[in-house]
Image (tube, rainbow, N blue to C red):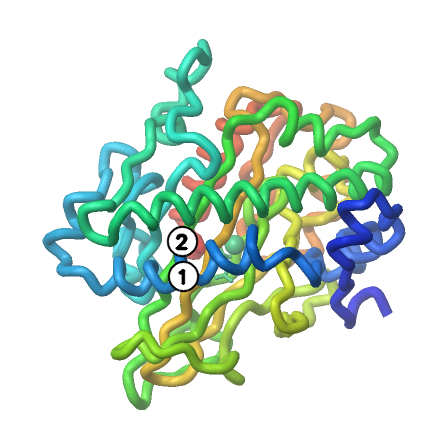
Amino acid sequence: EAESSLTVLDYDLLVSGHDYSVEVARAYSHDGLGILAVTGAPNQTVDEPRLRLLHLARKLALSPPAELAKYERPELAYASGWSRGREVFKGKPDLTKGSWYAHALEDTPAVGDAAAHRFPLITAPNVWPSALVGEEFEASFKALSRALYELAGHVLRNADLAIGAGGVLRRTTHERSRLHVGRLLHYYAPAEGEAAGEEGGEGQWCGWHNDNSVITVLPPALWLREATGEPVDACEAGGLVVRTRKGRKVEVRPPQGAVLLQLGEAAQILSSGALMATPHAVLKGSSSLSREAFALFVEPHWDEQIGTADSLRALHEADAANGDVIPPLSRRLRKLPVEFGQFLADSFAEYYASSQRG
Ligand SMILES: O=C(O)CCC(=O)C(=O)O
Ligand SMILES: [Fe+2]
């Protein structure tokens, strides 16, 4: 059943040009999970920078708050640099995770771009916390991002084949866009006795949301004893959970070492609803364990016009299957085509209003 099982692709076959369009269509269509796994990616380009970076995520997040505050960028709505406690969750500042955001592939993607000034929050140059965690942080963030970006290109090639729309997904992301955002996350360990792994409110590290990206690449998360930094085997409770169009919650349990690729709303729009974003959340694990994670959001360029006018109604109808779990597209997407940067801004406002932003 498309609904119930995670599609797994082999890295070597995928990058050698194997036709995985049937598998990709199954995973990303209306009845799929909206997420698939790739096994066998090379250690040197994925696992080595990933482990270096994820250990540094903990080190960064446990740095003195006064030091971290130097890397907060309120003038960019905390969309770059350090962000903790700036999102509201159930009426309270969300202190349960800390994020580092940066342009993933280059420090200054706005250089020479005439439209960038219209999108000041998402086009500012990167900053890096080298003084706190060393130069290795920036180097591994970029190395990991580059490898994941290339992997995304192979999956999108197959998604393009599946929808037969002339290569729109790859063209929009890999040929035209310089807007690819990395988010490094430290999920702070729950205290003893805190409700972990349960689905409502207090048991969530991250509330239900869709990503706005075309595709989001998620290398394996790392569970650590927060106090010592010692790795532990995957935590039984907690982690990523997705919601199907039938309303079922599915815990994502990928094969060891697999990279996950999750579809976002920009792909849903670009494919006129043939492919669907997956609503997801992150549940807390056991007490005293932190979770370190990285997400690469592969996106259209800020001024790219996405979607076609005649697909608006069908998109809204298909999206209604998400129920009220996430802010419906119909409230954020009134006309098509829309500039991607505008869609991001409208989504951000809507998620903020409902206090559910991941
Ligand atoms: O931590 C994860 O596994 C997912 C994070 C996520 O959903 C996000 O940052 O949008
Ligand atoms: Fe997400």
Q: What element carries label 2?
A: strand
Tag 2: residue type?
Leu
Q: Is mark 2 within 8 Å of ligand 1?
A: no
- Using the rendered image of the protein, determine whether residue 274 is visible from the camera's viewpoint: no
The picture quadrant where one finds residue 272 is top right
x, y (%) of residue 311? 76, 31
- Which mark identifies residue 307? none
Q: Name the residue under label 2.
A: 184
Would residue 76 be found to the left or right of residue 3 on screen? left
Q: Residue furthest bottom?
A: 193
x, y (%) of residue 184? 40, 53
Q: What element carries label 1?
A: helix
The first of marks 1 and 2 along the sequence is 1
Residue visible at 39% across and 48% down in the picture: 353
**Quadrant housing the C terminus:** bottom left
x, y (%) of residue 345? 44, 33
Q: Does the residue labelled 1 lie within 8 Å of ligand 1?
A: no
Q: How crowded is mark 2: few (under 14 residues within 10 Å), some or many (20 or more)?
A: many
Residue visible at 26% across and 78% down in the picture: 227
Contact check, label 1 and label 2, Cβ < 8 Å = yes
Q: How far apart are marks 1 and 2 (CA)?
A: 8 Å
Q: Which label lies toward us, 1 or 2?
A: 1
Q: Is residue 128 above or below residue 137?
A: above
The picture quadrant where one finds residue 273 is top right
Q: Is residue 211 above or below residue 224?
A: above
Q: Residue furthest front?
A: 44
Q: Mark 1 points at which residue?
A: 54
